[in-house]
Image: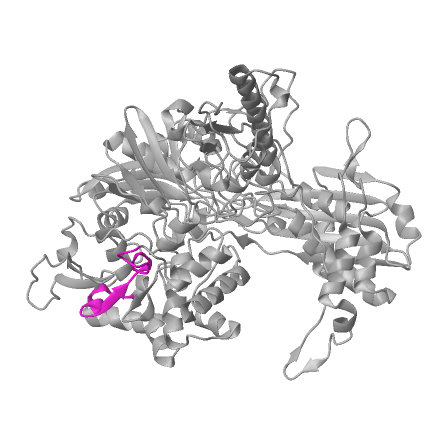
Amino acid sequence: MTEDAAKQFSRRNFIKGVIATGAVASSSAYLFRSTTLQGQPSAGGAPGTAERLITLNVNGQDRRLDVMPQETLAMTLRYKLGLTGTKIGCDRAECGACTVLVDDVPHYSCSFLTHRARGKKVVTIEGLADAATGKLSAVQQGVIDEQGFQCAFCMSGFIMAATGYLKTNPNPTRQELAHGVSGNLCRCQDYDKILTALMRGAQLMRG
Amino acid sequence: MANKLIGQNYVTPDLVAKVTGAAKYAEDFRADGMLFCKLLLSPLPHGRIRRIDTSKALALPGVKGVLTADDLPAPADVVTDLGQTIKANTKGEKALTNEPVYQGEPVLAVAAVDELTASEAIERIEIDWEPLPFVVDPLVSLRPGGPNARLEGNIWGKAKPAAPGAPITPPAIEELKWTDADFAEYEHGRLPMGTTPDEWAYGDVEAGFKNAALVLDETFVTPNTSHQTLEPRTAMAYWQNGKLYIHCSTQSVVQTVGSMSRWLHLDAKDIVVISQYTGGGFGSKATGTITAVIPALLSKRLNAPVMMRIDRETEHYIGGARPAMHGRLKVGFAKDGRITALDMFVVNENGPYEPVGDTGTSGRMVSLLYQPQAMRWRGVSVLTNTPPRRAQSQPGGMQGIVLIEPILAKAARKLGVDQVALHRVNAPEGKAEFGPAGPQGRRAHATSAFIKEALDRGATEFRWEERKAHGGKRQGSKVRGYGVSTSVFVAGSTGYDGLFVIKPDGRMYIQSGIGNLGTESMSDCHRVSAELVGIPWEKVDVTWGNTGKNLPWSCVSGGSQTTHAHTRAAHAAGKDAVKKLQELAAKVHGGKPEQYTVATSVSLAPAAA
């Protein structure tokens, strides 16, 4: 993981980002379907507020969305785009279950404001297999081959983090790959099996 | 002949959905008109609600309703798989309460069109609280005049034995206090040992200490360990045609119908539990979680689907933890490290609700694993105003082992005995007995034990002799030590129904009532059916995770028992199928059933002439 990428994960930067947008994102505040609470700007935007109708590129498709300024990418993906493969484990940038790729870099989508993803390419677990043939990606196939993971609630995050890491280092040692996915937690304590599966994925990727 | 399926690798039927993100956990379901609910959590470790004012919350646009403890049905009695009725414990845990006994306990729930509105409504609810005495440390509660976690006392009394055919009544809460004299020990860093409600012994403990070459008396405390399942205990519910459909996070599937039925006082036939994937349980979601009834009740009242997303903060409170155990062990050792006598004393942190089994299990597992020649065990589980303590992988056994292992390491050092050798000389063998004698005067025993073999193999593979020589030496800024520990727990129980259908298409359709924590028992257990009938795995379909699909009864998935127990049920079903196919063949083609062999594939088409 590059130092720049690591910096983008930090909670401090996330909080700074939130402050910059002039909104407060509460861990208990989600889904804004019909609320008119607290003078939230309506779609179309009041003067001085962020535009709410935006275009997001997710898994290769442009999606037009109504997004609140304080909305996180995880909530947009799960509740507005139906992409529930991205899991919310802690919702505070600690567990990594919500990891997605933004311009090929793994990000915790629970701590990434959806507005920041404008003009970028977002890839989720649903976007890894070949859209035309359904052929699984190398990392996905590695997990199948080695029966990595137990409950798999962390799996999407791990696969996305590994996919992102392997773009920067296609031939890692086991130690390096462990470091590459060190921002992801598995509560079933399956790390050894997970690493074996991800290393197998790396091998398949190299062909 | 080698098995074709058993013991062979295969791709489990849930795996592709997991890697593609298609696998749906409780929070991944949506329903038309779905409302969201949020919980109001108690700010107090113990208190009573004098008055609730929900008017400002209900006035908020988008708020649909409030559910309080007064809206909960009274808990129903339990009927065990053996038909024994256990009366409901009115002092046990409920989904919501007017007298919270731990900080963070759910007090009420608000349903609204979205979570932001529900959260805002929670902020507008006014509660007039009466604070009550509380205690978070079991030893503080045992002190003379110490606070009690519950108004009635600080320990559970003993359940009264039921007359044959009569229901079992739950124990009452009682008070236990020790004396100042007992607590004199505390000032010396040793666990005080006052009176305990539970005690057992076998052998001559005093003689064992007298004959020992070394006696150690040590106090240790194990930590509370939160389960922290990565999937919080989220639930979504709706009603259709008078039936409740509940998407929840549970370790078991068909057995969760029973607990929902008790908690909701609702006929089991009117409940459909859907849980194909569960993100971790570790004992805390054995038959679902009691808070899952909240969206079910709100949904019924509001006539709309309700999603209750449990966030991580709430999960910290309601998710449960392994109880901390305070232990004092006096251990006598012979020169070779054999344990001649063990006096084990434990004080368990029970949490505020149902009695946890860890206390007693700690003694029985230590007795099994280290085979003391004589042993006494005493224990008490003290109620505390801390989040509920729940079973966690190897409940009680783990704490017992953690309490004694440092003492064994110290004894090995003092006696000049190798640590592996010390464990070996105390290891159980064969039908090793453990615990106290039962009512018939006989002690329980293991069916087999191979700890010595495991130690030998472990020592070889770890290169114990070679590595221990480097132990304790400084390498740069680090000093590494080497140690050994053994572990044990009870496992195995009764499997129930094996169920599958072979259809004219030649495929085997297996129904599984087992939950899916990713341990794959919901699939592994049934491989034996296909093996016996001789159907290749490609022609097997497993249905699991939805009790609306006629799933058979199966054991609770907890305590590492499912594969052990339920494979036998699937084996019986497989054998039954073979017998029936042979009878069918004899009926259609003549001859005797036993003349037919069922193998490789099954076809119900007429045989070629």
Is B282 rendered above or below residue A19?
above
Q: In this view of the protein, which residue sits in the foreground, B236 or B531?
A: B531
Image quarter of the N terminus of chain B: top right
Q: In this view of the protein, which residue sits in the foreground, B329 or B518?
A: B518
Is B221 rendered above or below residue A166?
above
Q: Is residue B80 visible?
A: no
Q: In this view of the protein, which residue sits in the foreground, B121 or B587?
A: B587
Furthest-front residue in this view: B609
- Residue B575 is situated, as x and y percent measured from the top left of the image, at 60, 27
Q: Which colour scheme is used?
A: one colour
Q: In this view, does B192 lie to the left or right of B99?
A: right
Furthest-right residue in this view: B211
Q: Is residue B236 left or right of residue B160?
A: left
Is B114 rendered above or below residue A72?
above
Q: Can residue B271 be seen in this view?
A: yes
- Residue B417 is situated, as x and y percent measured from the top left of the image, at 85, 64
| Region of the chain picked out in magenta, as a range | A112-133
Q: In this view of the protein, which residue sits in the foreground, B504 or A82?
A: B504
Instruction: Give the residue at x 42% y 59%.
Output: A141
Residue A126 in magenta?
A: yes
Residue B382 in magenta?
A: no
Count the labels in the image.
0
- Residue B480 is situated, as x and y percent measured from the top left of the image, at 68, 74
- Residue A93 is situated, as x and y percent measured from the top left of the image, at 37, 64
Q: In this view, does B347 lie to the left or right of B497?
A: right
